[in-house]
Image (cartoon, rainbow, N blue to C red):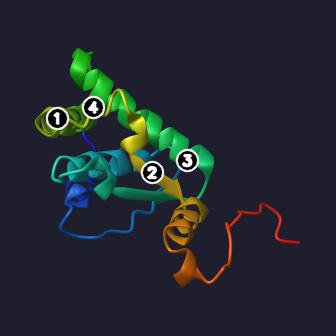
Amino acid sequence: MNVVDAAQRLQVIDPLHSYCVSAPAGSGKTELLIQRYLCLLGRVVKPEQVLAITFTRKAAAEMRERIVQALQGAERGTAILNPHQQRTRDLAKSVLIRDREQCWNLLRDVSRLNIKTIDGFCSTLTRQMPILSQFGGQVQVLDDAD
């Protein structure tokens, strides 16, 4: 299968530039995000230096799960079906090499993958800087502001 936007997909993974990806459901946006995340992981000293922010807990959990699956697949050498998956596999292999070099143990400690919701990220910031946040105590996220 020849993907019409293959060049753009490759470009989006480039960590030296920022992109806004807009595409219909099922077009591979999450796979692109995973590839970009893996590309960034392969370049950092600590995995916590890479942050992915999503809108929902479900999306954050799916992204974490798919990154772990990509790393496990690369480690096990499971079969891949298409060139797009090959790119993910190659990036995951690079991350596993970095993982061994830096002793991250990502597959044993997936909590080191910094994938949060917007409110989760904001909560982390306010907990780290309680005086600057001027909240006067522990911040609590509310699903219903009323």
Per the model, the C-alpha gap separating discs 2 and 4 is 17 Å
* Mark 4 or 3, nearer chain start: 3
Between 36 and 115, the one lying in front of the other is 115
Residue drawn at the location 51% of the way across and 39% of the way down: 62
Between 141 and 78, the one lying in front of the other is 141
Disc number lying in front (2 or 4):
4
Q: Against 33, is 94 above or below?
A: above
Amino acid beneath label 3 = Ala
Quarter containing the N terminus = top left
Q: Does residue 49 appear left or right of residue 133 in this picture?
A: left
| Disc 2 to disc 4: CB gap under 8 Å | no
Disc number lying in front (2 or 1):
2
Per the model, the C-alpha gap separating discs 2 and 3 is 10 Å
Q: What residue is shown with label 1?
A: 90
Between 15 and 115, the one lying in front of the other is 115
Disc number lying in front (1 or 4):
4
Per the model, the C-alpha gap separating discs 1 and 3 is 23 Å
Between 74 and 107, the one lying in front of the other is 107
Q: What residue is shown with label 2?
A: 115
* Mark 2 or 3, nearer chain start: 3
Amino acid beneath label 4 = Asn
- Percent coordinates x, y for residue 42 in the rendering: 17, 46
Amino acid beneath label 1 = Asp
Per the model, the C-alpha gap separating discs 4 and 3 is 24 Å
The numbered disc on residue 59 is: 3
- Percent coordinates x, y for residue 97 in the rendering: 12, 34
Q: What residue is shown with label 4?
A: 105
- Asked where in the image residue 70 lies, by quadrant, the reply is top left
